Amino acid sequence: MKRVTAEAVRRAWPEEVAPWVEALCEAGDALEIGLHLVGGPVRDFLLDRGVRDIDLIAEARGGEGGVTDKSTAETVARKAALPGVRVVVHRRFGTVRLSKGSVSVDVASVRSETYASPGALPTVEAGQLEQDLTRRDFTVNALALPLNAVASRGRSALIDPGRGLDDLRDGVLRVFHPRSFHDDPTRALRAARFAARLGFGLARGSRNTLRAALRDGAFGAVTGERYRAELEKLFLDPRHGLDPARAIRFLSETHVLAALEPGLGLPPSARGPLRRLGRDLGDPALGLAAESPWIAGLRLWLAPLDVALRRRVLRRFAVRGAAARAINGHAKEAERVLARLARARGRGSIDALVRELPDETLLALAAEAPTPLRRRLLRWIKEDRRVQLPISGRDLVELGLEGPAVGRALARIRVGVLDGDIKDRDEALALAREVGARSTGKRARGPGGRSGPARGRGGG
Ligand code: CTP
């Protein structure tokens, strides 16, 4: 395992945010506010998995910064006064998000409200940070690394109230107290996610804690929206190496799924497709921008279930509207598209068949298609979908095409390019003229011989 020093972690985080964190640290030192890197980034740094999101906690240690309250994070962020950086304050939570473009840093005030004990400030002060850490989900997520001089004062290089470092080394997820899953049953889904992403197991005592929460019916008290939010995160994590089949198997084996909806499990026929979906989601060569990969995941996971159970599961996860319709209709859609894909001749006709499908649908289809069809889909995703035509719609308008004829000509040219029949701009223009002439001919034969855009759907 890596040696932990603030210097080493500074070298690991994204270049863009380094000056922000430095400015926050300096501002904190001036105000007697300590800044710590906390949670996920410390864990990932120690596991050598790269540091992505920067989560900081701010802790006032007397002086101008006063006692930690919900304004501590804001105070330090305002003092740092970073030009061009957007600062969004959530007063209710005592948090601040600094951002510029797609880069962001979160700063939370050490949560002390529930634990504030007037009259015992000096001891409680250190305890406040500890309490903030020990109210978290797993010991490996409760590590804090003091970053500035004020945070480091009287502290070790790594603050580790739950022996999280040992658990990181042993690959173990361990909760802090026996009511952890009662307090927050969604932690079971987080456990599944971290277990699958990091290859960790749930400590034996924590399994008992989970069992007790299941036995006591704690999972029934949580809304579907919160579970769905966790599933959404789960299907985003293949980008960081998570196998969704493994995460869902964890939830099935620990009886969490049955507690969420009686009868729900991981159908054996969904395992392979989910594993392939995970690989595809994590494959940068596919360059897919699926915004809602969870929809692809639920299509594959729930397709083998009987209709009534699937509907109940979707209700339990608060999945409604278009997403619910897509998931419910998956088996039929897959059968129809894959049958046509098997019959398609040439890359142009494959393109015409799948072009309009959302990424989520494509991903689900590719994950469950038999190998030859999977290859066709992946080739289309990697290569054909990005093919640029040698002419644009504007060229066609200049040629005199109008209305639906433009779209028709572009579609024909696309097929020609993908099938290798059209090699350059001249050949594309020639085909466009042909389509244009045909549609003009049709218009001439139209009712009353009127010219103008063809009505209805023409051939071509
Ligand atoms: N946390 C918790 N219980 C939850 C959600 C979050 O205790 N139900 C705590 C965890 O200790 C976590 C921290 O809040 O470290 C921040 O949450 P989040 O950003 O979701 O966790 P990360 O560990 O940063 O997850 P990821 O690596 O996926 O971003």
Image: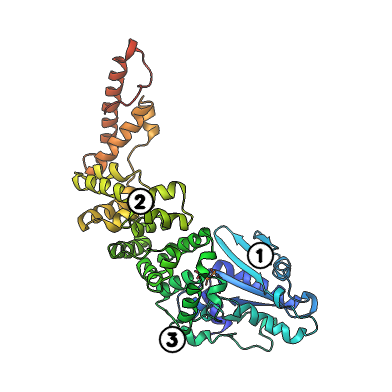
Separation of disc 2 and disc 3 at Cα? 39 Å
Viewer-proximal residue among 94 and 50: 94
Q: Reading the chain from its start, which is encountered first: label 3 or label 1?
A: 1
Q: Nearer the viewer, mark 3 or mark 1?
A: 3
Marker disc for residue 96: 1
Q: Amino acid at mark 2?
A: Thr
Q: Is ligand 1 less than 8 Å from the beta carbon at label 2?
A: no
Residue 426 relative to residue 78: left or right = left
Whether tag 2 and tag 1 are in contact, CB under 8 A, the answer is no
Tell me the distance, in whole angstroms, between the alpha carbons under discs 3 and 1.
Answer: 34 Å
SS at badge 3: helix
Q: Residues within 10 Å of mark 1 (few under 14, many from 20)?
A: many
Q: Residues within 10 Å of mark 3 (few under 14, many from 20)?
A: few
- For ligand 1, tell me if the residue under mark 3 lies within 8 Å: no
Label 3 close to label 1 by CB (< 8 Å): no
Which amino acid does the dot numbered 1 rest on?
Val
Which sits in the foreground, 178 or 162? 178
Of the two numbered discs 2 and 1 on the same chain, state the one appearing first in sequence: 1
Q: Residue at x 53, y 72 (%)?
A: 13
Element at badge 2? helix
Q: Quadrant of the C terminus?
A: top left
Residue for badge 3: 170
In which quadrant of the rendered view does residue 287 lie?
Answer: bottom left
Whether label 1 lies within 8 Å of ligand 1 gets the answer no
On the image, numbered disc 2 is attached to which residue? 361
**Which sits earlier in the primary sequence, circle 2 or circle 3?**
3
Q: In this rendering, does residue 355 appear at all? A: yes
Q: Residue 119's quadrant in the figure?
A: bottom right
